[in-house]
Image: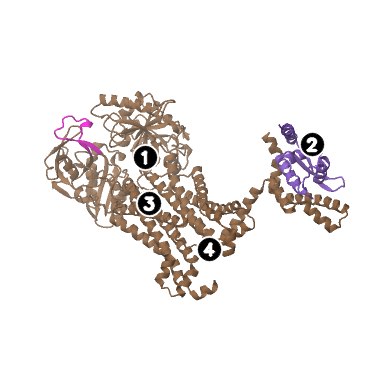
Amino acid sequence: MRIEHWWYTLPLRVRSLFRRTRVEQELDEELQDHLEHKIAEFRAQGMDPEQARRAAMRSMDGLTQRKEECRDARGVNLVDNTVRDVRYSLRVLAKSPGFTLVAVATLALAIGANSVVFGVLNALILRPLDVPRAESFYGIQRTDEHFGGQSYPDYVDLRDRNSSFEGLAAYGFGQAAVDMGDSPSRSWLEELSGNYFDVMGIQPYLGRFFHASDEHGPNSAPYIVLSYDYWHTRFADDRGVVGRVVRLNKHPYTIIGVTPPEFHGTLLFFYPDFYVPMVNQEQIDGVAWLDVRTNRPIFTAMGHLKPGVSIDQAEADLNSIGVWLAANYPKADPLVRYTLVRPGLYGDFLGRPVRAFVAALMLLASLILIAACANLGSLFAARAADRGREVALRLALGAGRGRILSQYFTESLLIALMGGVAGMFGSVALLRALSVWRPLDRFPIHIPLHPDASVYAMAILLAVVSGLLFGIVPVRQVLRADPYQVVKAGMTVTVGRRVSVRDLLLVVQVAICAVLVTASMVAVRGMTRSLHADYGFDPNNALLVSTDLTMAGYSTDRAPAMQKRMLDAVKTLQGVGSVALINPPPLDQAWRSAPVFRDDTADLSPSKAAWRSMEFAMSPEYLRTAGTALLAGRNITEHDDNGAPRVAVVNREFARRMFGGEAAAPGRYFKLSKGSRVLVVGVVEDGKYTSLTEAPKPAMFFPITQSPNSETWLVVRAQRDSTQLARTIRARMHELDPGLPVFLQTWEGDLQGALFPSRVATVALGIMGILGAMLAVTGIFGMAAYSVSKRLRELGIRMALGARRKQVLEAGLGRALKLLACGSIVGIGLGLLSTQVLSAIVYEADATPRDPVVLAEVVLTMLALGLLATWIPAHRALSLDPIRLLREE
Amino acid sequence: MSRPTDLVQGTLDLLLLKILALEALNGWAISQRLKHVSGDVLQVSDGSLYPALHKLEQEGWIASEWRASENNRRAKFYSLTRLGKRQLQKETESWMRLSGAITQVVRLEEA
């Protein structure tokens, strides 16, 4: 029935749409035919031709109206009207290019900001991981106060004892020197359980993957699976690469396959160069941990849940294994809770701050959009007021209010769509650029923000919604317009005592902008504080030389000798003030911590630990080289070596917590989980160890000779230009061992990693603040300029009557300034509230908006913005020539 | 010409469909036929005929076609479609019901 209906009617509609003139002509012809018959009829009744024609016309009851009825009956008037509205709107907008440009640019920025933030939200949080059947794919998070990793034996128990997962895979990170025949280079890799690719359900792009059946104990599977990108850049897409043998840390490994282009592991940010079986970890890491339960190098264990198994069931299953582990290995495994998480952001560890931050950004971005809508809404309302006469005329000529409104909405939607499209392209370009950006030199980290269809859709949706939003503002004006009054008396400007919609909009807008400015000020202030915080060491003018001796084939017991040779080699170089070993440097991502026990604790199971302390190993020169102050006791010496009793230097926080103060600490003991008693010989100042915003953490520094490790960092205090020094050091290292891949950077450079989160936050919030400030300026400017232009005549009369400049300014701008003040106060108030939340996320406790400096900055900024925005209108009001003005009017 | 007698709403559609069910006609001929069949009781203004025809065409009940009229002039001829036949049947039935009901009401003896 419906189909048959369309069968008859569709061709008609298409025809009336696209063959308009033809259809119109036919309509004419048809009616003309009728008319002629009618005339002939009247003639036959004896009328003269003219009489007959007029009678015939009368009989039609108005030819034009009938035609319009026929057109209405065709049902294409809607389309027709829309086309007409669009054309008319384009003409109107083209007539005031300044207005159009400002409006489109405002919206483009606002929608662009939203769509960028949405792109981030979409890519990092909403979009499922790019693995087959991502909806049932979960990682296991070990809810520990400290770190979520697993030990290999624990992983094996979880894998074999659970009944919830189809299969459980595991991965960890590593670095290795890759030697393809030329000089070795350092690469980032992931160590994978043998079943990894099968659990994920991924097929090789080239060659084959390794499987659980390839594992036959430690170091039994020397295979490499390359990532597509690494294969592309290092092997130039050479398909013959499969079967080639390369050396990893001097051990031969066979390349067996290449992963598909879109696959880069399961941690969103991390792009490893290649993958090796976890059973070969000893050759990569230098220490064996496959049978060590206390070492937790596995980053995440994960897999697909079996069909029908709920998250709760799976967690209960895992936790019962947890109870079993704690009962059987009390020394190694405290009772912890296991939860299921999405592995893309490493569960809650990265996920929680990222989610909170992106949500906060989304909130700010939507505030910007609301401010932009308020801005445009008041602009449109002002325009509608100016066009009152046009509206009145059209109403008087019989146009329906609906038609006039639809024309207004067409205008606002057009602006919105133009702005939306511009914002969309801008944001997509920005997202693409951010995706290829590699923020930290040392790590293969990308932020994969590749925009997809939902980003485009969101931008357009936002455009339409905001178009309707600010289009709705002038509706009341049109509905209430009384054509009779307007045509008779001209547009009356109500110099309002009343609070108008436009005033409210301006206050809203200014308030939002003040919130944004406050937020960005807090961020910037927090950042500057971070930069000038006391790190507990001096990163200026110092170099970090890092290498892993495993990569050059040194075993751990041979490492100390080699490290001594490196120290001696660098010490004698020109321009070197001092040099020391530290493992790891504070604020480096490689930080470690360990549980510590009071000396009187007998039971050394993890649950009896006093707390966890940051753990460092150093050579005696470190404190001097780093510029860390010794507060009490003595430094470690060369004599605190392997044969001597274990000693440590602790920081003030450690001393306070363990011994009640720095003076009491030297000479006292504490214990480590393996049972060794450690004598505290000295106390140093507190420092920052994992992040710039952390609360003081306890830390202990062991003599490096008592805890040898193949990972090696040299801190070099430079006496002259450090870039040149870097070159000499590199050359010296090469002389020492050409097979040793060395990474050199300034200590400040190394801190980029620690600074990265707050830097991102600062930039993002700063941009939001700038956008907010721009909106405030255009909004206030629009309002002030409009109110001055509306009252030019009045101002002119006042001046002619002898008003002083101050009075003129007050009359012209007083209202705008009052609104500005209202908005600012409300906004700063809200800003104080909201940034409390914000700073808790970004800076933990650092710069709160209560900070008087921040408050002063915000007030000054808003004042400056207000002055800037009212400057031109004020100038215009003051430079009025009353005589000319009155003559013109 | 006087204003058209107020037709019961929808009756014009029914009349047009009925007339076109007999044969395909052009606008002028339809207006003449209307006058003849209904005598002077039902008068349709020449003006309202065409919008009504266009509406029926849009509904898919009638189709139009340009061809030569009796005096060899090009004219637009309307004819009933299959959908139109069904519609005519439906409207005839509902008219019968309505007029029957009204006739009964009118014939009620006043007490």
- Which chain is drawn using brown? A
Could you tell me how far apart the alpha carbons at marks 2 and 4 are, in whole angstroms? 61 Å
Badge 2 amino acid = Ala
Element carrying mark 4: loop
Tag 3: Cα neighbours inside 10 Å, few (<14), some, or many (≥20)?
Answer: many
Are both tags, 4 and 1, on one chain?
yes
Toward the viewer: A555 or A173?
Answer: A173
Q: Residue A492: give its label.
A: 4
Q: Please give the residue where the numbered disc 3 appears in the rendered image.
A: A765
Q: In this view, which residue lies farthest toward the front? A: B111
The magenta stretch spans which residues? A593-612
Mark 3 or 2, closer to the camera? 2
Mark 2 or 4, closer to the camera? 4
Tag 4: Cα neighbours inside 10 Å, few (<14), some, or many (≥20)?
Answer: few
Toward the viewer: A631 or A81?
Answer: A81
Q: Please give the residue where the numbered disc 2 appears in the rendered image.
A: B21
Badge 3 amino acid = Leu
Q: Which numbered disc flags the more N-terminal residue, 3 or 4? A: 4
